[in-house]
Image: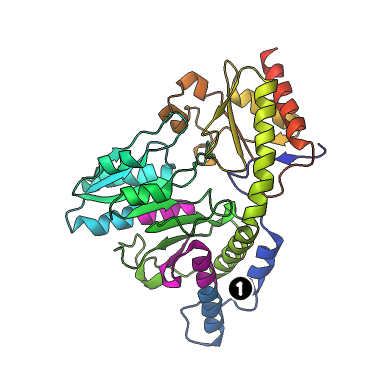
Amino acid sequence: MSGLLYLDHAATSPIRPEALEAMAPSLTRDFGNPSSHHTVGEAAAYALDDARARVARVLGFRAGDVVFTAGGTEADNLAVKGIVLAALARGRSHVVTTPIEHEAILESVAYLGRFHDVTATLVPTDAHGRVDPAAIAAALRPETALVAVGHANNEIGTVQDVPGIVAAAQGVPVHVDAVQSAGWLDVSGLGADSLAIAGHKLGAPKGIGALAVRGRVPLEPLLHGGGQERGRRSGTENVAGAVALATALELADGERVAVAERVGAQTARLIAAVLAAVPRAALTGDPIHRLPGTAGFTFDGVSGEAVLLELERRGVVSSSGSACAAGSDEPSHVLLACGVPPGLAQTSVRLTLGRQGLPGDGPERLAALVAASVAAVTS
């Protein structure tokens, strides 16, 4: 493989040229504030409304349900805090989630506990990171305000049975973090009451995301001010980012089936080749219910960070897990929740492919580079 091979798409992906081109008018000609009542502002408002409708169509929501945010973290915060805070007045002060969720969900739940006496039940997963919908049902209480789960885990790629979880929730609002799954999987028929996405995972710029939340679900805003986004998120809207997000999301969804099949087959070959070439390797996450482009491993007795450095020296850029936890030397909370011992969890390496995938014999050649990197660390 010549040049640098970027395999950290779960952290961020490059901007699609089409998204960059689509946002240009909102940065130049149609630069107005969409709240301004003149022709320049109205042009911006039209572009924003069009982007909102396009995002809603892909996600399976109504246009008025879509709230543009600064990214997936804000979208998760708005959903978890906003729905629960609104429910407190009705005596609902309990949240059901899992211990493998993104920090945006777990820390939001922790905040609600510290400052609003909200209690939480963390439903355990199996060793592959899958949660049983029946366990969700068993965790419900009369005062449960929200069930919050990730559609696909950002570290191990495990995909949850969201329709089953929604059914198990028995009418309790369900928030789904679809930051990793949007563009790879169909998120339009999950049945979620709210759903979060992030633009930079799809080919839009960093700094734009969306929360789609059903109009019937009360939501307390986190940002107060001018009442933008139907009063659910005040602040002058990022029109150019919204247009780019809509463009990238439509493109990703349009090619989703073909890309998932092609990249999924390559990832399966990569996993098989790494497991064959490195005896101490073990796959993380569910071997069947997983994102098409995610391949995570632990290497018993080997420093994961050392393997990453060796891979980069060989031209492969990857990571050990969530970019949001970069700089932390603590073992992954996701792997710990799956029952992986702390020492073994610190050996993890995550390879995440983009929509381009790998060249013809790329999976096998990449596996050889992984084997060589592990051997260099242990020699």
Tell me the quarter of the image containing the N terminus.
Answer: top right
Q: How is the image coloured?
A: rainbow
Indicate yes or no whether the magenta region holds residue 149. Answer: no
Looking at the picture, tell me which residue is in the foreground, 157 or 376. Answer: 157
In the image, taking residue 131 as reference, residue 110 lies left or right, namely left
Q: Is residue 125 above or below residue 359?
A: above
User: Which residue: 45% across, 43% down?
Assistant: 160
Residue 290 falls in image quadrant: top right
Looking at the picture, tell me which residue is in the foreground, 356 or 324. Answer: 356
Percent across and percent down for residue 147 are: 32, 48
User: Which residue: 31% across, 62% down?
Assistant: 219
In the image, taking residue 265 as reference, residue 128 lies left or right, namely left
Looking at the picture, tell me which residue is in the foreground, 324 or 163. Answer: 163
In the image, taking residue 238 as reference, residue 261 lies left or right, namely right
Q: Mark 1 Cα within 10 Å, few/some/many (few <14, many 20+)?
A: many
Percent across and percent down for residue 244 are: 60, 65
Number of numbered tags placed on the structure image? 1
Tell me the quarter of the image containing the C terminus.
Answer: top right
Given the current orientation, which residue lies at the most extreme top position? 379
Indicate yes or no whether the magenta region holds residue 54. Answer: yes
User: Which residue: 69% across, 64% down?
Assistant: 18
Q: Which residues are magenta?
A: 51-79
Given the current orientation, which residue lies at the most extreme bottom position? 38
Q: Main secondary structure of the magenta part?
A: helix
Q: Is residue 136 above or below residue 246?
A: above
Residue 231 falls in image quadrant: bottom left
Q: Amino acid at mark 1?
A: Ser
Instruction: Write down the residue under mark 1.
Output: 26
Q: Is residue 247 above or below residue 190?
A: below
